[in-house]
Image: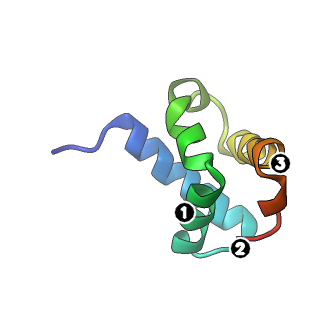
Amino acid sequence: MKPSGEVWFLASCVEAYKNEKGLTGREAYNYLRKTGAVSFITGCWQGLHMTSLPYVVDCIDEYIKTHNPELISAP
């Protein structure tokens, strides 16, 4: 089965997030999953994928700050 655009975009977001935050891919993905950001990314990927990855990382941080502020500094 070929991965969907949603999966490719999620992988790009994890890669951008790990690079921005100095994490491993596994740390970044686990953190994004724990904070609910994976659902956020996959839920609105069609709109987000037309923007820049730095903007997406900012959106992810804003989502986490708004929905899980207690996890903002804990990957």
Q: Which mark is residue 22?
A: 2
Of helix, strand and loop, which one carries label 1? Answer: helix
Q: Quadrant of residue 24?
A: bottom right
**What is the spatial separation of the Cα atoms under label 1 and label 2, in whole angstroms?**
13 Å
Amino acid carrying mark 2 in the image: Gly
**Relative vertical location of residue 34 with respect to residue 55 in this rendering, above or below:** below
Q: From this viewpoint, which residue is outermost toward the top?
A: 47
Q: Nearer the viewer, mark 1 or mark 2?
A: 1
Nearest to the observer: residue 4 or residue 42: 42
- For marks 1 and 3, the one nearer the N-term is 1
- For the point 67% across and 37% down, which residue is it? 52
Separation (CA) of disc 2 from disc 3: 19 Å
Specify the farthest residue to the left: 1
Q: Earlier in the sequence, mark 1 or mark 2?
A: 2
Residue located beneath label 1 in the image: 29
Q: Residue at x 71, y 45 (%)?
A: 60
Crowding at label 2, few (<14), some or many (≥20) Cα neighbours within 10 Å? few
Nearer-the-camera pick, 69 or 7 = 69
Please name the residue that numbered disc 3 is placed on. Answer: 65
Instruction: Give the camera-side residue of 33 and 44.
Output: 33
Image coordinates for residue 11, horizontal then vertical, percent = 47, 53
